[in-house]
Image (spheres, grey):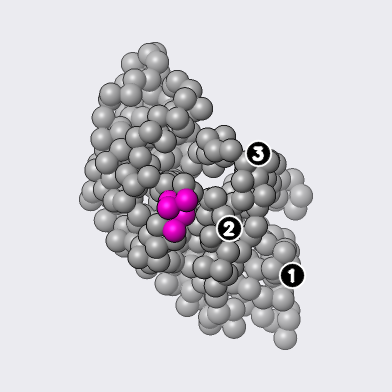
Amino acid sequence: MLEHGGRLRKAALEYGIDEADWLDLSTGLAPWSFPVPDIPLRAWARLPEADDGLEQAACDYYGTLQALPVAGSQMAIQLLPRLRRAGKVGVLSPCYAEHAEAWRRNGYIVREVLEQEVDFFIDSFDVLVVVNPNNPTGLSLTPSRLLDWHTRLAQRGGWLVVDEAFMDNTPQLSLAPFAHQVGLVVLRSFGKFFGLAGVRLGFVLAERKLLKLLAEQVGPWAVSGATRVVGQACLRDTEAQTAQRLRTEEASERLASLLAQHDLEPQGGCALFQWLITERAEALHEFMARRGILLRLFTHNSSLRFGLPGDEIAWVRLAQAFDDFAKENQ
């Protein structure tokens, strides 16, 4: 398995700090979880049913014609390669590493490309995978540019796969309204924006034939009855969604400002995280970890991703740690 953020128990053991004493900024999850509704007993006692309203709630929320619920978008990432014959796949990198890994595991030739290289290589790809906004760089691409890439791929029977795990704050940039087009696959993650990663819920948006083929790979009852209740309630709670967008955007701007104040100007980010390239990435990661603050370290490009602090105590703690780091490295 690839390494991911959020491995708090591992960090607690490694640094000898109780889990409860950590400030975990290693994930791109909103630190404010949506309220979980009361789960009726039937959701636990009966097998899940697909006509309970979850799919329609997802279509309404994402602005699309059809949606397939899955047990987290990670499930779709691993299963999509099974729906094609082996070929060449481009992955816009750096990005969430599971994408390239999933296609490689299924026998595809994978080329990781930079944004400026896509137009040169795209005609040699059978599939192009893009994370938008990107994780961890925060790069956002316009719908028009992505749809142009989709057109070039679809003309040859290819796919454009767009992972929109961090799109909830910028729905105007989503390709969800176009996902009914052949050759376009949009992945949406539920847990990040709603702060409920533990429910394991995601959605695949695509044309009906592809969703049917993917549903056969997913199998029956992949999303639990309790998860379906929670998902539907959150997707329909427009008031809470508005509040979540506002506070995540404000916190992200505050985090970028805090980093800049300590000569750590971020190179990218979105509403749920900030991303910093620095030659001191490993040193800063270690310094923070010794103080019970967990960051996401990317060693291959010496960068760090910072999630959002959830309250004033966390903000003060992070600011003090930055001050201490600056003093130690004068």
Q: Which mark is residue 203?
A: none
In what element is the residue under mark 2? helix
Q: CA distance from mark 2 to mark 3?
A: 19 Å
Measuring from the top left, give residue 28's x and y in whole percent.
51, 55
Q: Which residue is mark 1?
A: 283
In what element is the residue under mark 3? loop
**Is 166 on the left or on the right of 37, as rendered?**
right
Magenta region, residue range = 152-156
- Name the foreground residue: 74 vs 298: 74
State the residue at coordinates (74%, 70%).
283
Q: Which residue is mark 2?
A: 124
In what element is the residue under mark 1? helix
Locate the C terminus and report the quarter of the image it occupies.
Answer: bottom right
Could you say which quadrant of the image residue 287 lies in? Answer: bottom right
Judge whether 139 appears above or below 3 on screen. Answer: below
Q: Give the mark, 1 or 3, whose residue is nearer the N terminus.
A: 3
Whether residue 245 can be seen here? no
Locate the N terminus and report the quarter of the image it occupies.
Answer: top right
State the residue at coordinates (48%, 74%).
256
Given this view, does label 2 or label 1 mark the residue nearer the observer? 2
Q: Marks 3 and 1: in contact by CB < 8 Å?
A: no
Q: Which residue is mark 3?
A: 106
Q: Give the mark, 2 or 3, whose residue is nearer the N terminus.
A: 3
